[in-house]
Amino acid sequence: MRVLFLFVAVVWGMMTPALSAAGWMFVSEGGGEKGITTIDDNQLKYTAPDHTMIFDLNENRITFINPQEKTFWSETPQSFAQQARMSRENIEKMLDEQLKQVPKEQRETLEKVLRQQVKPMVSGPPPQVTVQATGKTDKIAGRKVEQYLVLVNGEKKEELWIAPSISLEKDFDITRYGRMMRDFQAALGNSEEAALSEPVVMALLKKGWPLRTVMYDEYGYPETEEVVEIEEKEIPPTEFDVPKGYERMAKDQIFGH
């Protein structure tokens, strides 16, 4: 009888389609706003009140969605970087043309001011990134978390409170995600933001998922985003699609560069 039962179980298993592993949904709060992060099958979707970002590791594609205007932009990080580089070159040309029209005695002072404004978009030497475990722990959304500090050129830029009980490696390739984020932020000229996706930082996400993130601006002012709800659930593939009826827009129209 036991042999018959095992045989039936095996045959039934062959005939029944395998159920996909459940994905994850994290509801977070920060800055007076609520955000939802959905992760499954190498795709990450972050939904804020005024925009949605989708990182598709399978297609190597980043999508930005504007629900107010019902528009979207979608490209590979490499294509985005090329467009951003062209935008920076155009800004430099426009700056040169404008300076030619300024009287010589005023040109030097004005040029310093304008160059300073453009400076954040110009890439410099790669920042030095280090990670420190503090040994501090807390409990967020019912999960134990451990604090890590991320320092960029010796300055504290980020705190990540990691939940070791939440492993996303089977649902999400952390290494590829870090590479995509670095390419995306570097294209925007955000060298420090890109540094926060360096392999040494992404290694923390392999330890567990962050349930509290504290970002420090250039003045050391902290901005905190904390997960308030966690759900492991089946995510339909359509969750990561652009809504029907949305119009594709050029990068310049979406990001304003």
Image (cartoon, grey):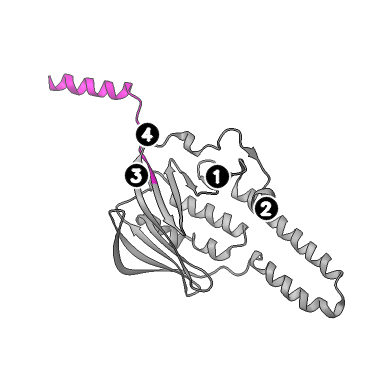
Q: Residue furthest bottom?
A: 105
Q: What distance separates the C-alpha of mark 4 from that of mark 3?
A: 16 Å
Q: Position of residue 176 (x, y in %)?
A: 49, 50
Q: Quadrant of residue 73?
A: top right
From the image, tell me which residue sits under label 1: 60
**Disc nearest the viewer among 3 and 1:** 3
Give the answer, above or below, for where 89 lies relative to 216.
above
> Which residue is painted at 17% across and 21% down in the image?
5
Residue at the (27%, 21%) spot, across then down: 12
Q: Nearer the viewer, mark 3 or mark 2?
A: 3
Name the amino acid, label 4.
Answer: Ser
Sequence order check, earlier mark of 4 and 3: 4
Q: Which residue is mark 4?
A: 20
Left or right of residue 222, residue 64 in this image: right
> Is 15 part of what is drawn in magenta?
yes
Q: Nearer the viewer, mark 4 or mark 3?
A: 3
Please report whichever mark, 2 or 1, sits nearer to the chain's N-terminal start: 1
Q: Are marks 2 and 4 in contact (CB under 8 Å)?
A: no
From the image, which quarter does the C terminus lie in? Answer: bottom right
Assess whether mark 1 and mark 3 are in contact (beta carbons under 8 angstroms).
Answer: no
Q: Estimate the x, y position of residue 142 in percent, counting from the top left.
A: 28, 53
Q: Amino acid at mark 2?
A: Gln
Residue at the disc numbered 3: 231
Which portion, as a residue range, is magenta?
A: 1-25
Name the residue that disc number 2 marks. 82
Q: Earlier in the sequence, mark 4 or mark 1?
A: 4
Q: Residue 92: x and y, percent?
A: 76, 64
